[in-house]
Structures are given as structure tokens and as C-alpha cells.
Amino acid sequence: MPSSLDDARLGARNSKPLAFLSEFPQGAAERIKALLAASADRHGAEYYLAEFHARHPNLLAQIAATRPRLQWLITMFGFSRFLSEELLQHPDWLNDVPDVYRVLTVSDYSERLAWFLAERSAGVSALDLALFRRREIFRIAVRDALNFGTLSEITEELSKGQIKLIPDILIGGGGGGGNAIDGLLGLKLMEMIDPKKKELEMVDPKKKEGDKK
């Protein structure tokens, strides 16, 4: 696996990662090419798309027939290396994205967390909760990258408790315990949106320019 997006770009150029598109109907192949052309980092997106096809060929064939999920996938492959790696490991996230056109409330997250926990009868670990958080960040990143929400709405969803309060929802809002879990999982706003952190590694040049001001 390439250690950087520069390596990914080099590998993409040398290995012709889009060769697999010959397996797709012409309409689906053209949609993929158009989305790649519009990507914030086309070469990185090509690399991750080829990786996704190698690991999940049948799923990609299904996704290619549904424009929304295909758009989310390719957009994220050119938007965040961190989330791209997560999608390679958890492709089912593409089937579990609720309404991307509105801000989810604490109640919405509470319900999603309840369903998530119910699927883990063997017990819930800190890693499980971290996985839940990453899945929810993926949804917010889709909204941000595709301009499905205003800057104020994206900020609200990140900063006014929806993501940060997930540990408190889990333990019933229990004061100090919530802070302990918060620290354990790193559920802090700056860890999610500060481009100097390695977790999201956004490549949107406009955002980087804004951060310098």
C-alpha cells in the first residue's frame, strides 16, 4: 500500500488502475470517469478506486449503477486518505448513510448508536465506539465535500454536540465518565477538523488556504 498520496499517484500512472472499467457497461464507466475528472485529487481517487475494485468487485458493480453512492465513494477517495482507507475496510458504510441533506440531531445519533450497539451482543469496546464515530464522520464529510450543507450546518453538526456527545449518549450523560470516554476516543472538535491532525487529511485546497488566514 502506498505510504503517501504521491506514491499512490505514481502507482496509478504506472499500473493503469482504470483498466478494470472495461468490465463495466459503457454508461457506468462514463459516470466513473466523469466523477474522477471532477475529483479534488484525481490520481489519489483512481488509486483508491482500483483498490476498492480489487477488494470488492461485486459491490463496486452494484454501486456503479446507483449514482449517489458512486458519487460519495469517488468524492471521498479524492477528499480524505484516512476515510478512503476506512472505506476499503468497511464498504458497508456506503449502505448506511442516512439523510445527507440535513443536520442530524442528538436524538438521531442516539438512535443510530442504539442500533449499532444492538448489533454487538458480545460487548462493546473502545474500538467499536471509535468505528462508530468514524462512520458518522464519513457521512458529515460527504455532506461537506459535496456542498450538501452550508458551512454553518457542517460546523453545527461537528461542534454543537452531535458527534462529540456520542460517549455521553452511551452512558446517559454521566459527567466525568463522559469526559473520560471522550478523551479515550479523541472525540474533540479540533481533532476532527484541524488539517494539521492526521486523522482526516483533507486535500481541499480552498480549506487549506482558509486555515492559513
Image (cartoon, helix red, strand yellow):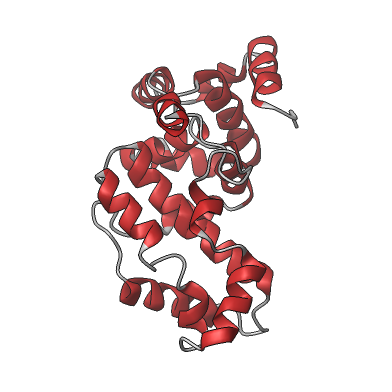
> Relative to 137, is 146 on the left or the right?
left
Q: For the point 39% across and 60% down, which residue is it?
A: 159
Which quadrant would the N terminus be assigned to in this image?
top right
Q: Position of residue 93 (x, y in %)?
A: 49, 55
Q: Quadrant of residue 73?
A: top left
Q: Quadrant of residue 151?
A: top left
> Relative to 82, is 204 on the left or the right?
left
Q: Position of residue 66 (x, y in %)?
A: 34, 41
Please tell me which residue lies in front, 158 or 170.
158
Please tell me which residue lies in front, 25 or 169.
169
Residue 32 position (above or below residue 123): above
Q: For the point 54% across and 50% down, which residue is it?
A: 91
Q: Position of residue 34 (x, y in %)?
A: 36, 20
Residue 193 position (above or below residue 13): below
> Relative to 155, is 42 on the left or the right?
right
> Relative to 122, is 209 on the left or the right?
left
Which quadrant would the C terminus be assigned to in this image?
top left
